[in-house]
Image (cartoon, rainbow, N blue to C red):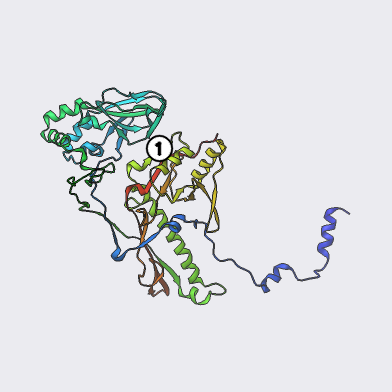
């Protein structure tokens, strides 16, 4: 008998038992709660200490600090032509408070564009320093003499950095390091002679530079804070200096930000379709999860208070070889005391793991809330998918000290708000419309504050696509 004949014979036989399709109509289906792919671990929200902010505003009082102007310089590019935005020259310390945009425009126009190949030297140790270098694109290494006479990399600079601006106020300045291009590099160079010629025609610029030369160096300590005069090691009845601790006259204030949405549920759904799961409860649960995801995203990326945008320039470093290696994380840790945690995109953590494997290193791990978290030098490296990855496959790694008592980074919220279901998160009933739709206002208030600059550091331009 052929196969076709056997099938026809089976079909000809009468059904002897209840089919599964009909039986399903009498069976109870076991269901899962609604699932959501967007939910992440949100380690930043879990590990950050939270400060209760009354009145919705948190003021960070600091010791008086003299602004040094070490910020990023921004450029515009037209084809192969690169120009610095005139107002961005105020990011140079010597031009920080200078307001004449016409003169700044003239200085910007006198910048010379230069191109350097990888390995070429921009400046040499010991030579007279008569130029300001504005780094438009590429990486530059500052090379100094190590303790045993060999060359050592003192610092790695990247896009937007600058160096040599001390030559504008000190005609006798010399280069205290060698600057060497680590990649193909584009820089704009502002000669001191061009600044002096512009100052001859501009009384305001000349007065500004002369005023800077007259400021005594002892006004500030190495952190830029107003110095506290002290005496130590003296004997007898020496005259002790008088001093006081000055405060910032206009301290920064952080206002709580908000994330909100209106959740709508038809009354018929809420009344009739609540078994075995409460529809309103699960709608609210998933809405709250989405709000928390947005909250963490804002606390990292927001232009006003996000961690990536509130890290001081001197606390930003560049990787020595592009990919994040142990040396880079060591450098990041050395910039601050008591680092509590790293935050990195999962792909950056994988890139760091590859660098460790290449060197034969195995980072230790610790258990946090039931999860095994990799560490470096005892500091846990938490994954955070809110840290952006650029089209060039680069990202950043954040390192921070946390807590008010440690002068670190803190989260801000206001507990005790009306209809609160969690601290600083509320669900308010807004009423029922004429279409029988029930509305709930779901709100969360939050922000983040960096109490002192060295509480937060960032390893920038980390390459995550390198495989060796």
For mark 1, give the secondary structure.
loop
Residue drawn at the location 45% of the way across and 41% of the way down? 329
Q: Residue at x 25, y 51 (%)?
A: 63
Residue 263, given in percent of the width and then of the height, sits at 42, 67
Q: Nearer the viewer, residue 112 or 97?
A: 97
Determine the residue located farthest toward the front in the rendered image: 236
**From where the camera sits, is residue 114 visible?**
yes
Q: Where is 410 relative to 145, above or below?
A: below
Q: Residues within 10 Å of mark 1 (few under 14, many from 20)?
A: many
- Vertical placement of 46 versus 129: above or below? below
Q: Quadrant of the N terminus?
A: bottom right
Q: Total marks drawn?
A: 1
In the visual, does 458 lie left or right of 218? right
Q: Position of residue 404 (x, y in %)?
A: 35, 57
Residue assigned mark 1: 318
Asked whether residue 183 is in view, the answer is: no
Residue beneath the point at 50% across and 58% down: 39
Q: Nearer the viewer, residue 368 or 390?
A: 368
Q: Quadrant of the C terminus?
A: top right
Determine the residue positioned at 33% across, 28% down: 177
Q: In the rendering, at what x and y percent does residue 311 appear?
A: 34, 46
- Between 267 and 7, the one nearer to me in the picture: 267
| Residue 53: % across, % down | 32, 63
Out of 37 and 123, give the one closest to the viewer: 123
């Amino acid at each position: 008998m052929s196969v076709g004949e056997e099938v026809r014979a089976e079909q000809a036989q009468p059904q002897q038992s209840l089919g599964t399709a009909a039986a399903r109509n009498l069976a109870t289906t076991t269901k899962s709660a609604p699932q959501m792919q967007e939910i992440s671990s949100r380690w930043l929200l879990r590990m950050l200490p939270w400060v209760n902010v009354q009145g919705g505003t948190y003021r960070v009082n600091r010791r008086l600090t003299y602004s040094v102007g070490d910020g990023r310089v921004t450029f515009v590019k037209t084809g192969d032509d690169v120009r610095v935005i005139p107002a961005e020259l105020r990011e140079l310390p010597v031009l920080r408070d200078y307001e004449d945009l016409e003169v700044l425009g003239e200085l910007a126009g006198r910048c010379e564009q230069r191109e350097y190949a990888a390995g070429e030297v921009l400046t040499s140790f010991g030579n007279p320093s008569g130029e300001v270098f504005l780094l438009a694109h590429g990486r530059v290494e500052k090379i100094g003499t190590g303790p045993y006479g060999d060359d050592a990399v003192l610092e790695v600079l990247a896009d937007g950095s600058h160096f040599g601006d001390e030559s504008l106020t000190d005609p006798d300045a010399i280069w205290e390091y060698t600057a060497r291009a680590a990649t193909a590099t584009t820089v704009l160079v502002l000669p001191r002679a061009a600044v002096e010629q512009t100052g001859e025609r501009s009384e305001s610029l000349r007065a500004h530079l002369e005023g800077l030369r007259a400021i005594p160096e002892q006004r500030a300590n190495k952190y830029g804070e107003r110095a506290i005069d002290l005496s130590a090691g003296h004997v007898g009845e020496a005259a002790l200096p008088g001093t006081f601790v000055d405060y910032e006259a206009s301290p920064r204030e952080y206002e709580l930000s908000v994330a909100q949405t209106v959740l709508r549920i038809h009354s018929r759904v809420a009344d009739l379709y609540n078994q075995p799961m409460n529809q309103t409860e699960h709608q609210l649960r998933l809405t709250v999860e989405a709000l928390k995801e947005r909250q963490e995203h804002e606390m990292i990326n927001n232009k006003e208070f996000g961690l990536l945008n509130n890290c001081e320039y001197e606390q930003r470093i560049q990787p020595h070889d592009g990919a994040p290696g142990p040396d880079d994380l060591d450098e990041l840790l050395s910039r601050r005391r008591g680092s509590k945690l790293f935050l990195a995109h999962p792909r950056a953590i994988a890139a760091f793991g590859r660098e460790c494997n290449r060197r034969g290193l195995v980072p230790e791990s610790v258990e946090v809330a039931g999860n095994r978290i990799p560490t470096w030098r005892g500091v846990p490296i938490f994954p955070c998918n809110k840290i952006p990855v650029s089209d060039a496959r680069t990202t950043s790694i954040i390192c921070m000290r946390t807590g008010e008592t440690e002068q670190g980074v803190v989260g801000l919220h206001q507990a005790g708000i009306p209809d609160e279901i969690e601290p600083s998160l509320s669900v308010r009933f807004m009423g029922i419309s004429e279409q029988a739709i029930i509305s709930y206002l779901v709100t969360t208030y939050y922000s983040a504050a960096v109490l002192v600059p060295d509480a937060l550091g960032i390893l920038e331009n980390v390459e995550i696509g390198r495989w060796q």
